[in-house]
Image (spheres, helix red, strand yellow):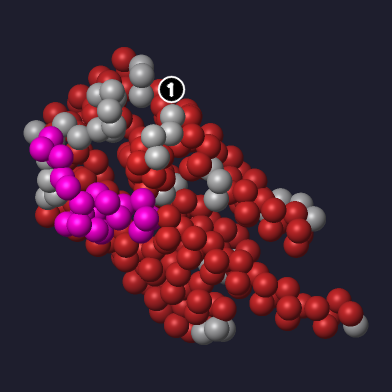
Amino acid sequence: MATIASMPDNRHAERNFFSGMAVAILLVALVGFARSYYLRSFFPVPASDPGLTPLIHLHGILFTGWLLLLLAQTRLVAARRIDLHRQLGMAGAALAALLVVIGTLTALQGVLRGVGPDGIDPRRFLLVPLVSIVLFAVLFGAAVRARRDPQSHKRLMLLATLVMLPPAIARLVIFFGLPPPVLIAAATLFVVPMVVWDWKTRGRLHPVTLWGGLVVVLSLPIRFALLQTDAWLAASNWMVGLVQ
């Protein structure tokens, strides 16, 4: 009887946990992009800044919309409005498809404009956003497929969003003058609450947290290793040549 009585509290705590994760992700994105995008007009712009293009604005609108949609979806589940959650899910699928297309074009445009982190050839750095886009598409597709399994679905949706968060985190790391390895460590921090939550509530890791978390944790260092290879530079030159 005690176990049965505790179930509503557990469900309530779970809803609050995933809503809290969505809020934290949104706040990191807003703060990370505040200086370079959201509050750009309030800060001095360096003479070397190439400016924002319509494509970048579209990408910013879609990305912000995705984060707001994630928050709305977690709150709808918390409010037990599963009907609206499913209806918004259809809009989410369309938004995800747009993010993949516009995100890819924005990444390629960045190379053509010569935009990249200090000291890294933009053609080499192209690997970082492209892999994020691919991982987002794969994880989101898996989340859609697992929509009848709420525990897998909600974790996959969080992980799909997390793989797009490193650019916001990178801006915070650069702003505070921290070394690049901090970016890799910081970009994986959001996996930690998921691990702790699983151990606390399940006594073990959910398979999605385990394997998806490993993808998030390992993908960045692997990308930074691969972008230094001649093979990737040749592939990047080929892709950029297609849109020039």
Residue pictured at 42% horizontal, 61% vertical: 26
Residue pictured at 35% horizontal, 41% vertical: 175
Please provide percent x and percent y for residue 207: 66, 50
Q: Residue furthest right?
A: 1
Residue pictured at 31% horizontal, 58% vertical: 63
Question: In the rendered structure, does residue 221 fall within the stretch colored magenta?
Answer: no
Residue 140: in sight, yes or no?
A: no
Q: Relative to 102, is 115 above or below?
A: above
Q: Secondary structure at mark 1?
A: helix
Q: Relative to 200, is 136 above or below?
A: above
- Within 10 angstroms of label 1, few (less than 14), some, or many (20 or more) residues? few
Please provide percent x and percent y for residue 208: 61, 51
Q: Nearer the viewer, residue 55 or 83?
A: 55
Residue 233: in sight, yes or no?
A: yes
Judged left or right of residue 116, residue 179 is right
Segment colored magenta: 29-49
Please provide percent x and percent y for residue 25: 46, 58
Q: Relative to 10, is 136 above or below?
A: above
Number of numbered tags placed on the structure image? 1
Give the residue number, with chain letter if any, for mark 1: 225
